[in-house]
Image (spheres, rainbow, N blue to C red):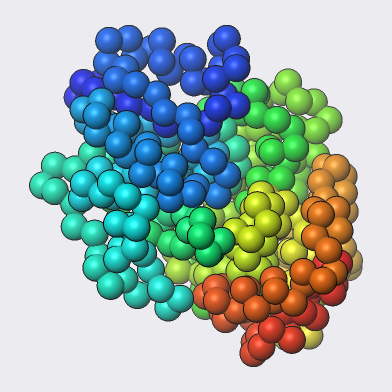
Amino acid sequence: DAISAKRVFITSTQSLTKFADGPLQKIEAALGTRHAGTFTAIGAHSPREGVIAGAKAARDAGADLIVAVGGGSVIDATKAMLMCVWLGLETPEAMEPYREDQDRNVRTPPVPPADPVRMISVSTTLSAAEFTPRAGVTESSTHTKQAFAHRLFAPRVVILDPSATLNTPEWLLYCTGIRAVDHAVESFCSKVANPATEPLSLQGLKLLHRSLPAIKADPAALAPRLEAQFGMWQAISGSTAGAGAGASHGIGYALGATFGIPHGHTSCIMLPAVLKWNEPVNGDRQKALSTAMGAPDRPACELIAELVAGLDQPGNLRAAGVTRDQLGEIAKRAMHYAPVRRNPRPIKSPDDVMEILELAW
C-alpha cells in the first residue's frame, strides 16, 4: 500500500507452489485483485533463459512491482528481470552487453527509465541475496556465473519473517545458513576488511553458529530462525560495506555454474579447505573467528567443518558427486572469478586452486 502498486507480479520457485498455505499462497491471497500473476520457472543458479522468460511474463502482466518469494536464485533472477523489463530485453543474448567482466567493468551500464519497476523480497532461505544490488546469473552455453549490477536492483523492502522459512527444506535452509557463514568469514578475512565491516562479520558468525544447530534441534521454533536471519543480515553487511569475498566464493562459482551444485553446498565444501589453505597468512585473524564461535583454542576450519557435519551437509567434493578427473577443469574455471584473485593468500595459478581442491577432496 505504501508503494501504491496496483499490478503486483510475483516470482518464486516451483517447489513453493505445492503448499496450500505457504508464504507464496499467503502473499497471493493478501494481494487480492492487485495480484497480476506469478512466475515460478526459475531454475537453480538463475539461468539467463529463466530471467528472460520471467521478464516477458512480468511485462505482459503490466507489472508495476515485483515481489520475489524464495531464496538466492529467485531473488537474483528477479534483479536481472528488472533490467530486462526496463530495457525491453527479449533474448538471453541481449543481456550480454550489460554484464560485468572479470574486473567488474561493464561495457554498457543499464540505464533504467524515469519510473522503473522495482522489487520487494520475501526470503525463504539464508542466502542473503536480497541485501545486495548485484545479480548472479548463469550463462548456460558456457556454464559460467556472470554478474549484473545496478543500485536499483536492491529491493525497496526486505521482509525477514521466520515463518516464511518453515516450508523450506531443512537441507536448503542449513546449507544457505553455511553460505551466510561463508559471507561472514570471507568478509572478515578479506584484505580490505576494516573497522566498519569486522564487527558485523564477527557478530553475524556468532549468531549463525549458535542458531543453526538450534533450528535443527527444534525445527518448529521461530526464535532461532529469526536469529539466523539477523545473523545472515550482519554477515552479508561486511561484504556490502566493502569487504570482498575470497576463494571459497570464487571456487564455488565455478562448481555451481559447471556442475549445478547449490552455492550453499559449495560453501559447506570449500570454506573449511580455503581456511586451512589460508591459515599461514592470516592465522591470527582466524583465531578471532574461533573466538566468535566459542572455541578460541581450536582451528576455525575444524569448527566450521563440525558445524557442517552437525547439520548433515556434504563436507567434501566427493559427496557432491565431483570426480577427481574433473578437478583440473574446476581449477582452470575458478581463475576467471574475481574473488579467487582477491583471496588473502595470493592464488597465482590453477595449481594453487588444485591445492585447495585437494584439501576439499
Task: Give the residue at the far left of this rendering.
Answer: 114
> In this rendering, does residue 199 appear at all?
no
Q: Residue 206 versus residue 329: which sits nearer the camera?
A: 329
Quarter of the image that includes the C terminus: bottom right
Q: Is residue 119 left or right of residue 187?
A: left
Image position of 282 with respect to 361: above or below: below
Q: Nearer the viewer, residue 190 or 107?
A: 107
Residue 124 placement: quadrant: top right
152 lies left or right of 80: left
Which percent across, then down, holds residue 223?
66, 28
Q: Nearer the viewer, residue 41 or 229?
A: 41
Query: Is 132 situated above or below 302?
Result: above
Q: Is residue 34 above or below residue 49?
A: above
Quadrant containing the N terminus is top left
Would residue 318 be visible to someone looking at this image? yes
Q: Is residue 214 left or right of residue 77?
A: right
Locate residue 11, reporting x and y percent: 42, 31
